[in-house]
Image (cartoon, grey):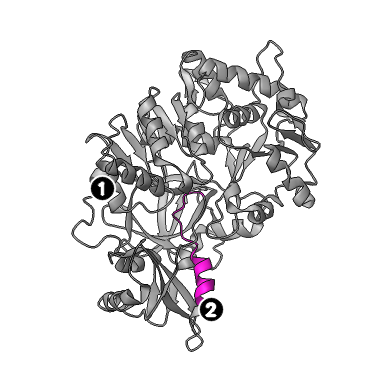
Amino acid sequence: MESSCQNIEGKQVNNISEYLKLNAERFPDKPALLHPVRITYKELEAEVNRYSFGLENAGIKAGTRTILLLPVGPEFFILTFALFRIGAIPAMIDPGMGIRAMLKALADLKAEAFIGIPRAHLLRFIRPSVFKTVNIKIATGNFWFLGAQRLKSTQIDPGKKYQACKVDACTTSAIFFTSGSTGPAKGVVYTTGMLDNQIQVTKSQFRIGSDEIDLCTFPLLGLFAICHGNSSVLADMDMMHPAKLDPSRVIKNIQDFGCTQMFGSPMVLNKLSDYGTANRITLLSLRHIISAGAPVHREVLESFSQLIANEAKIHTPYGATEALPVTDINTSELLLTGSDRPENENGICIGYPVNGLDVRIIEITDNLIFSWNEAKQIPVNEIGEIAVKGPWVSIEYFNNRDANKLAKIPDPADHGIWHRMGDLGRIDEQGRLWFYGRKTQRVVTESGTLYTIPTEAVFNQHPLVSRSALVGVPDSLTGLKKPVICIELKRGSVPAMKITKELLESGGTNNLTKVISDILFFSKFPVDPRHNAKIFREKLAGWAVKKIK
């Protein structure tokens, strides 16, 4: 592995923060941030330089694990790049998962520094054992708070440039926690090499130029946008709770600043398209749209496509915190794929593997796989677990031996590491990957295995169904699972019992779902806070057990 990052404009980058420095040299007066405040690259670099000295003076040094808990705004980006420059390790976690889950995830981090808003510092008093290793406490805002020094008091202007810590590709650069939507949140170790490769591949895969105006709705991609030399508009929304967004405000962001690219989860795109269609709004400045975080359904793509120019591209890449992106496909091909049959009954097409990444399908097993030589690869069009290996795939979780054993497979051929995505899929004859759902959410019955995506697609076709969820409850007769379909109806629908018969009849005519005889109705499904699209089927399963006798 190389000991340094890429050459940019003929200059060597040895630290991710150098992307900001080089962009400030290339176009100093260009806005790095356009909203909520306008900050040029020169100004952003100056702020990062001052805080690099200040945070180091406060005791943060290379290798210091630093919890960063503050809203996505100018301070978030300034502090993140300053920590990169020092060689410290920012640890980022989604507060939307809930205090209990967040504290559990942070417990093993053994952080040494904590930078956050005053409210976040209350966690130190709720569960002091989680933060017993923290000896550097910094609070944002304008007043002293519970033993934490003010962030502004750390700002130093020494009148010289801070020399970025030189790191190699294997150095831990950051720890990003998973959303915890399908199990406990885990700290994903991002090395400098991994981050650098992600910066490069997102730029090339999505054809991002340095003249883009980016609508930021997700923090990590906002960091990439600055490294790409873009101007970013921080969307007027709570990025930790995107379901609460006001589509009129986000659309105004796009129109006011002429945004040319954006990332949005399927839920975000759906809200924007509903509002835009109802108000006859077009977003013709957009030319690159990326939607990920959950399956992107055909109706969302079709409706959002009506708002944008014909030549604009909507990409629906697949990936996870541990590996992003894995595959990519754009709307022009995706809407033609499988258009002659009901959507999703054959899985969801999630595109072609991105160049530079190795994607394989292995036999489904819940057991550990200790060597890639033991992994059984399966033929084209057979369903198995998705495994990936490549330069932007994380090779470990932080301080989590059990998770590493379960998800990581050493490859003796090249000493690399395969990551088990925990997702099920197949690769077709054209090399495209199709998604079938989470491995842990499959339901193994006496007559075969049911997968969430194709099973739910049968019931989602009913006009009164908002969404459905396949869950399994223990079957005392077979020792396996009994499949149950949970239904969330659309608002204003007729009483649930009136359509139960129709749903059972629909399922009974399909070979895939004819074994399902139990349907339950749930008013509003529990979903992940990050994208508000991944259904917490495990919670529904626990509820269903009490309903099915």
Amino acid type assigned to the residue bearing label 1 in the image: Glu
Please name whichever residue, 370 or 402, is drawn nearer the observer in this view of the structure: 402
| Residue pictured at 79% horizontal, 51% vertical | 129
Q: Which residues are magenta?
A: 530-546
* 349 over 460 or under it: above or below: above
* 536 over 280 or under it: above or below: below
> Disc number at residue 302?
1
* 149 over 516 or under it: above or below: above
Q: Is residue 544 magenta?
A: yes
- To which quarter of the image does residue 494 belong? bottom left
Q: Is residue 334 magenta?
A: no
Q: Secondary structure at mark 2?
A: helix
> Disc number at residue 546?
2
CA gap, disc 2 and disc 1: 39 Å
Q: Secondary structure at mark 1?
A: helix
> Disc number at residue 167?
none
Amino acid type assigned to the residue bearing label 2 in the image: Lys
